[in-house]
């Protein structure tokens, strides 16, 4: 079924009831240039989630370990043998006996869960501009592409969609992703990426685990530093395409969100790739497999109206200006 969904357009077929889900258009788009309030409680939910994270640190730590080991979670589910609703069983009409017989005929089956499914952190539309945006947030410019979770382990590298469907299998120079490197066979690496098929490049958005060291329980600011450092020091070969590393892995640059930095950024063209949108991460956010108000999504065409920062035509021409829901990169697929 998952394979069929992928062929029909993947998770873009999903209809979501979640608050400010990026599956749907921006909740303020129809009246975007009007000042309005009451479109959500993002500020409140951000504060609550920051508190909740302290209790969830251990859970996020084990998240990456379960993915690497490919753990298959199972649960017992009662399954009737199909005889429900009958008042007579084997000629017996006594209700108590009938109930006991039915119970004995119930069978157990195991429900198997894909360990790679729904492991990505998802964003919300930026509806309420955070008061601490300039000091406590970082921004990443995102390319148009396919969102993928890349797992390098046991000498091979595999890319999975949000639904857990395997999109590709190939060797790489990510730690644990190439059986030709003897000292890496016991390592494992998990990175959150956007795949640009035209450039045959995985743009690394975030890191969940590097060389068997899980960092899901680390704050976003540290994960960005860790990712940049490890890709430059250990994974530099993964940034170059070759026979044993056919697809490149390039880190996405991040920026502080103060007005001067963003004004300077939006004044110039963006030469690296076609832009899908902008992702804003709270510096203290952990990597959690859920939709998070600590990760916000915004299209470039909405920046001036929402943030009050002018975007030059040079920068705007490098982006997807469609007002429709963001594509695969929007922390969605």
Image (cartoon, rainbow, N blue to C red):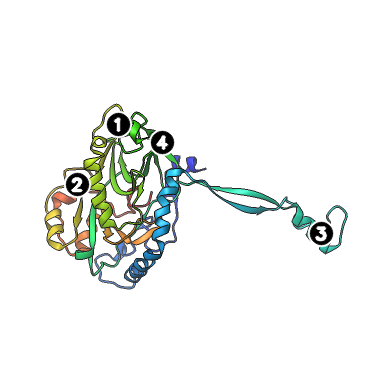
Q: Earlier in the sequence, mark 3 or mark 1?
A: 3
User: Label 3: which residue?
Assistant: 98
User: Label 2: which residue?
Assistant: 318
Kindly report the distance in space between the C-alpha atoms of the residues bearing marks 3 and 4.
Answer: 53 Å
Q: Earlier in the sequence, mark 1 or mark 2?
A: 1
Kindly report the distance in space between the C-alpha atoms of the residues bearing marks 1 and 2.
Answer: 29 Å
Q: Earlier in the sequence, mark 4 or mark 2?
A: 4
Q: Earlier in the sequence, mark 4 or mark 1?
A: 4
Q: Secondary structure at mark 3?
A: helix
> What label does residue 154 carry, if any?
4
Kindly report the distance in space between the C-alpha atoms of the residues bearing marks 4 and 1.
Answer: 16 Å
Q: Earlier in the sequence, mark 3 or mark 4?
A: 3
Residue lying farthest to the top in this orientation: 243
Residue lying farthest to the right in this orientation: 91
* Camera-nearest residue between 126 and 256: 256
Q: Is residue 27 above or below residue 150?
A: below
Please state the total of marks drawn on the protein image: 4
Instruction: Mark yes or no: residue 138 visible.
Output: yes
Judge the density around disc 2: few (<14), some (14-19), many (≥20) Cα neighbours within 10 Å. some
Point 29% across, 35% down: residue: 200
Kindly report the distance in space between the C-alpha atoms of the residues bearing marks 3 and 1.
Answer: 64 Å
Point 22% across, 48% down: residue: 319
User: Label 1: which residue?
Assistant: 245
Q: Secondary structure at mark 2?
A: loop
Kindly report the distance in space between the C-alpha atoms of the residues bearing marks 2 and 3.
Answer: 71 Å
Whether the residues at callouts 4 and 2 have beta carbons within 8 Å, the answer is: no
Judge the density around disc 4: few (<14), some (14-19), many (≥20) Cα neighbours within 10 Å. some
Location of residue 203 in the rendering, given as x and y in whole percent from the top left corner: 27, 43
Judge the density around disc 3: few (<14), some (14-19), many (≥20) Cα neighbours within 10 Å. some
Q: Is residue 66 above or below residue 98?
A: above
């Amino acid at each position: 079924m998952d394979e069929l969904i992928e062929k029909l357009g993947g998770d873009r077929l999903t209809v979501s009831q979640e608050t400010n889900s990026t599956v749907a258009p921006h909740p303020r788009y129809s009246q975007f240039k009007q000042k309005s309030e009451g479109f959500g409680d993002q500020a409140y939910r951000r504060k609550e989630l920051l508190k909740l994270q302290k209790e969830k640190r251990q859970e996020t730590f084990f998240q990456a370990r379960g993915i690497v080991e490919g753990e298959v979670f199972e649960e017992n589910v009662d399954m009737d043998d199909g005889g429900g609703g009958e008042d007579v069983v084997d000629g017996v009409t006594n209700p108590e006996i009938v109930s006991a017989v039915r119970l004995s005929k119930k069978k157990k089956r195991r429900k198997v869960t894909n360990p790679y499914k729904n492991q990505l952190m998802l964003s919300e539309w930026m509806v309420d501009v955070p008061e601490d945006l300039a000091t406590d947030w970082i921004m990443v410019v995102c390319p148009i592409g396919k969102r993928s979770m890349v797992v390098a382990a046991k000498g091979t590298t595999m890319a999975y969609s949000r639904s857990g469907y395997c999109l590709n299998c190939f060797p790489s120079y990510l730690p644990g992703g190439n059986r030709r490197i003897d000292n890496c066979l016991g390592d494992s690496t998990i990175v959150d990426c956007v795949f640009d098929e035209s450039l045959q490049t995985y743009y690394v958005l975030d890191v969940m685990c590097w060389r068997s060291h899980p960092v899901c329980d680390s704050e976003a600011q540290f994960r960005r530093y860790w990712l940049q450092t490890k890709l430059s020091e250990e994974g530099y070969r993964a940034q170059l395409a070759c026979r044993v590393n056919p697809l490149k892995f390039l880190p996405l640059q991040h920026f502080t969100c103060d007005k001067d930095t963003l004004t300077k950024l939006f004044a110039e063209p963006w030469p690296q790739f076609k832009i899908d949108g902008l992702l804003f991460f709270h510096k203290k956010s952990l990597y959690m497999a859920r939709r998070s108000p600590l990760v916000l999504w915004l299209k470039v065409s909405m920046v001036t109206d929402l943030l009050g920062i002018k975007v030059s035509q040079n920068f705007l021409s490098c982006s997807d200006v469609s007002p429709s829901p963001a594509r695969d990169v929007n922390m969605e697929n």
